């Protein structure tokens, strides 16, 4: 077999290099593919995979690494040139909106156009730098190479919590799409005595804050007022839950609070008792929410929690809606 060596080929405008004839087999050895192979001189044709170097240099000389090869590649519909610079991009009759001019290969009059200089992209339109002329200009083809968001299968462990927006995980995305799962639990406690003779509800200092992950979530509030103390012959004590300073109980009276006691303990100096509260709230929010226990005395006699430094607690549980 004869061998012809070509030292260098300098491309000239309008020049075509033809190697072989129809039916011939052209072999390009590994040695002939140098590090100078780059996007500038790769214009057409196919080189067998085995002939490529390990890394393909980019135009600026850096290696093209970690390239996302998955994507939606689209051949746009043929365009009839009119005397304008703007043309609609469609595929199968539907509008196509490339991510940028760099995502397109545009051939005009047999010449590949430079993105950004020869044309730009505006929504689903291509805008050439100068108006084309009907009858003399021909748009050969426009191919959209896909977008950075058209990825293939995501690798395991690549999506972190930080990449998930607040409220992005709803009950539809939880196990079996069924609500009722406990998403988070927050608890706070108080063991210093708080006392009041006010007949209006005042903040006891027992509270906690929580930030729901979805607007559909509910918050289950569990409060245990240990060491609640009543002084005087007749005492009424009430306790309510306030969300961000607003009473969640439509019945604002002490005797109709979430937790209340009406006691007549004549002859006793005081009485200790434990009062539980359980309430399910629907805040419809993904912002931080504070829940606080407010207490009041119905008779003006002292009412207190954590009388002898007993622990009172409040627990907030986010429940998937």
Image: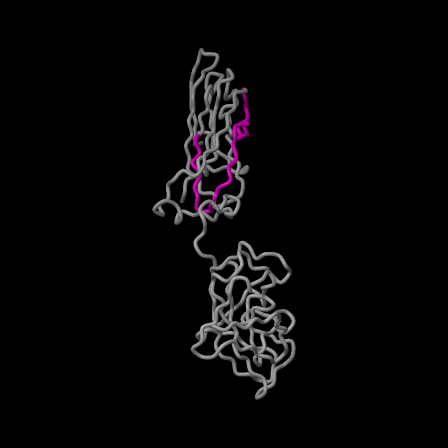
Rendered residue at 53%/54% (across/down):
66
| Range of magenta residues | 193-222
Which residue is at the far bottom? 135
* Residue 311, placed above or below residue 103: above
| Location of residue 123 by image quarter | bottom right
Q: Is residue 128 left or right of residue 175?
A: right
* Quadrant, the C terminus: top left
* Residue 288, placed above or below residue 47: above
- Measuring from the top left, give residue 24's x and y in whole percent: 45, 76
Rendered residue at 47%/14% (across/down):
270
Q: In front here: 189 or 307?
A: 189
Rendered residue at 56%/74% (across/down):
106
- Measuring from the top left, give residue 268's x and y in whole percent: 45, 12
| Number of marks in picture | 0
Q: In front here: 65 or 115?
A: 65
Which residue is at the far front? 1
Asked whether residue 73 is drawn in magenta, I would say no
- Measuring from the top left, give residue 190's x and y in whole percent: 52, 24
Q: In front here: 5 or 86?
A: 5
* Residue 185, placed above or below residue 168: above
> How is the model colour-coded?
one colour
Q: In front here: 246 or 151?
A: 151
Rendered residue at 47%/62% (across/down):
49
Asked whether residue 203 is drawn in magenta, I would say yes
- Measuring from the top left, give residue 93's x and y in whole percent: 45, 75
């Amino acid at each position: 077999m004869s061998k012809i060596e070509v030292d260098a080929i300098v491309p000239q405008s309008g020049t075509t290099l033809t190697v072989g004839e129809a039916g011939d087999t052209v072999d390009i050895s590994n040695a002939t593919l140098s590090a100078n192979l780059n996007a500038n001189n790769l214009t057409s044709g196919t080189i067998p995979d085995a002939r490529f170097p390990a890394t393909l240099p980019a135009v600026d000389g850096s290696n093209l690494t970690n390239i996302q090869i998955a994507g939606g590649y689209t051949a746009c519909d043929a365009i009839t040139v009119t005397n304008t610079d703007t043309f609609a991009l469609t595929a199968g009759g539907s509008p196509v909106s490339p991510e940028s001019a760099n995502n397109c290969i545009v051939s005009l009059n047999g010449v590949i156009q430079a993105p950004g200089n020869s044309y730009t992209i505006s929504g689903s339109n291509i805008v050439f730098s100068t108006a084309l002329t009907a009858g003399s200009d021909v748009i050969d083809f426009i191919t959209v190479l896909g977008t950075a968001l058209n990825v293939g299968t995501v690798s395991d462990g690549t999506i972190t919590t930080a990449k998930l927006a607040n409220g992005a995980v709803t009950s539809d995305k939880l196990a079996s799409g069924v609500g009722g799962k406990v998403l988070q639990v927050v608890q706070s406690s108080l063991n210093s005595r708080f006392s009041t003779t006010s007949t209006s509800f005042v903040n006891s200092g027992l509270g906690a804050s929580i930030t729901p992950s979805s607007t559909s979530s509910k918050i289950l509030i569990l409060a245990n007022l240990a060491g609640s103390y009543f002084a005087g012959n007749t005492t009424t004590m009430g306790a309510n839950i306030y969300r961000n300073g607003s009473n969640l109980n439509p019945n604002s009276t002490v005797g109709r609070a979430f937790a209340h006691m009406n006691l007549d303990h004549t002859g006793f100096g005081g009485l200790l008792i434990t009062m539980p509260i359980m309430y399910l709230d629907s805040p419809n929010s993904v912002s931080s929410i504070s829940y606080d226990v407010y207490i009041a005395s119905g008779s003006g006699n002292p009412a207190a929690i954590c009388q002898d430094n007993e622990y009172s607690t409040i627990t907030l549980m986010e429940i998937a809606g």
